[in-house]
């Protein structure tokens, strides 16, 4: 397995853990920020979207409930979509 695939797998596992309350927001964000090999293999737009989602997720962690500005559930769902699209890109590239 390539390093990029491993980094994507780490993000996916931490996202599942976050959804189930077993992983902190900070841990997921750190994995996303440190996934340099993965980011290098994906188009620049993927990094932009990932950064925007993790920034909003970090801001949403300040609230204990859903707010009108940030839906934590929607952000987690959007991150899952990002993971799925990134996996498709790596697979299409043969990685």
Image (cartoon, rainbow, N blue to C red):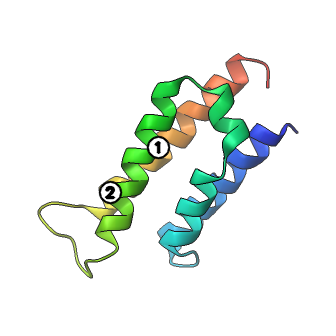
Toward the viewer: 46 or 1? 46
Q: Secondary structure at mark 2?
A: helix
The numbered disc on residue 17 is none
Toward the viewer: 79 or 46? 46
Q: Position of residue 94 (x, y in %)?
A: 79, 19
CA separation in Å, label 2 and label 1: 10 Å
Residue in the image at 58% along x and 52% along y: 32
Q: Is residue 7 above or below residue 55?
A: above
Residue 61 appears left or right of 68: right
Please identify the quadrant where the N terminus is shown. top right
Q: Residue furthest bottom?
A: 64
Residue in the image at 23% along x and 78% along y: 65
Residue 22 appears left or right of 92: left
Please identify the quadrant where the C terminus is shown. top right
Name the image quarter holding residue 59: bottom left
Q: Residue furthest right?
A: 1
Report the residue marked by disc 2.
Answer: 56
Q: Mark 2 or mark 1, which has the lower sequence index?
A: 1
Report the residue marked by disc 1.
Answer: 50
Q: Are marks 2 and 1 in contact (CB under 8 Å)?
A: no
Q: Residues within 10 Å of mark 1 (few under 14, many from 20)?
A: some
Q: Position of residue 48 (x, y in %)?
A: 43, 36
């Amino acid at each position: 397995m390539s390093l990029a695939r491993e980094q994507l797998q780490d993000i996916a596992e931490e996202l599942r853990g976050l959804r189930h309350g077993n992983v902190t927001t900070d841990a997921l964000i750190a994995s996303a920020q440190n996934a340099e090999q993965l980011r290098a293999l994906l188009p620049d737009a993927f990094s932009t979207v990932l950064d925007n989602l993790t920034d909003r997720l970090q801001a949403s962690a300040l609230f204990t409930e859903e707010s009108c500005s940030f839906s934590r559930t929607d952000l987690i769902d959007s991150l899952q979509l990002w993971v799925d699209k990134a996996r498709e890109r790596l697979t299409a590239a043969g990685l």
